[in-house]
Image (cartoon, grey):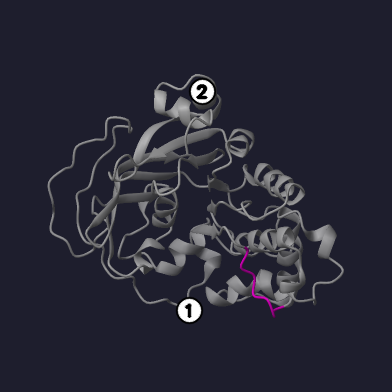
Amino acid sequence: MSDQTLSATSPTPPTLPTHPTSPTLPMSATSPMSPAPALDDTMDLGTSAASGAAPGPGSPRLTAAGGDLRAESVSAWFGDRKVLDHVSLDMPKGVVTALIGPSGCGKSTFLRILNRMHELVPKATLAGRVLLDGRDVYDPQRRLTEARSAIGMVFQKPNPFPAMSIYDNVVAGLRLTGRRAGRAEKDHLVEESLTKAGLWREVGNRLDQPGGALSGGQQQRLCIARSLAVRPRVLLMDEPCSALDPTSTRRIEETIGELADEVTIVIVTHNMQQAHRVSQQCAFFLAEQGTPGRIVEYGPTAAMFGSPQDQRTSDYVNGRFG
């Protein structure tokens, strides 16, 4: 496994110290991030991050088992302003990891770093490594499309293609990533993805209607289905329920629980009750008095809420600030 930093062009730097509240992991050093490679639309997802040929209509599972995701000493900057400082975190498969903390502490930035979206921001740089099943997500030999299909993202605001049909919304990722599929496989994939997202029963008889005509909660589940259609190993969710009503929120949370055995899930949420309900592991981020965000404490969700080791964690999960 390569010991290279997130920059493909930087010289070999000195080792950085471990953050006291982070696991002891091999550390990388500070370096400007290299430009994103051009999008390759000839990639065949059928033989990418999953483990073999593209599943056909008889395929019993939507995704390969989730992957083990690890951040090693990740730091990030916007221009000269450092926003994350030496964040190290294991996000194992089969576990829903919740990232909690006040606004502005770097949770969403960290989430975007995990699938290389941070590099889309002008003057954004970072250091450290992100590994999926031991392989560096930022390896310059790794196609950008492969990295982002292996690590999908669901955003805070639902963003379906409004004029595109429900059916075409689900399969849109296939075209964008260059995967070829026949009509029968697409039909199976649409039903399977919408079923996993908890939406098939509601829209299965009107797949030709525009995605923009769905309710907010349905649109968010459509976006989840669209992400699942390219068979990711990891699904990142940035406050996916913040704009939804309680009923839609409950359905999204049920979907997260149903998907947890098939795809590794990392969710950012400001809702402490939601973090407690859906996750098995929590990481508490905090940025104090103009300092960069870092992880104060992390561990099993039950312990983080029931017997946190840091008083700041206790104050936050009990609503005393934030």
Question: Disc 2 residue type?
Answer: Ala
Residue 180: within the magenta?
A: no
Residue 195 percent coordinates (x, y): 76, 56
Residue 60 percent coordinates (x, y): 71, 53
Taking the image as shown, residue 258 lies to the left or right of residue 292, namely right
Element assignment for label 2 = helix
Residue 142 lies in quadrant: bottom left
Which range of residues does the magenta coloring cover?
Answer: 158-164
Residue 102 percent coordinates (x, y): 45, 42
Judging depth in this view, the residue of 37 and 274 nearest the camera is 274
Quick check: 184 above or below 309?
below
Q: Is the residue under label 1 in contact with that under label 2 (CB below 8 Å)?
A: no
Taking the image as shown, residue 22 lies to the left or right of residue 303, namely left
Q: Residue at x 37, y 37 (%)?
A: 295
Residue 147 percent coordinates (x, y): 44, 62
Residue 296 lies in quadrant: top left
Spatial CA distance of label 2 from label 1 is 46 Å
Q: Residue at x 59, y 71 (%)?
A: 173
Q: Which residue is mark 1?
A: 42
Question: Disc 1 residue type?
Answer: Thr
Q: Which residue is mark 2?
A: 303
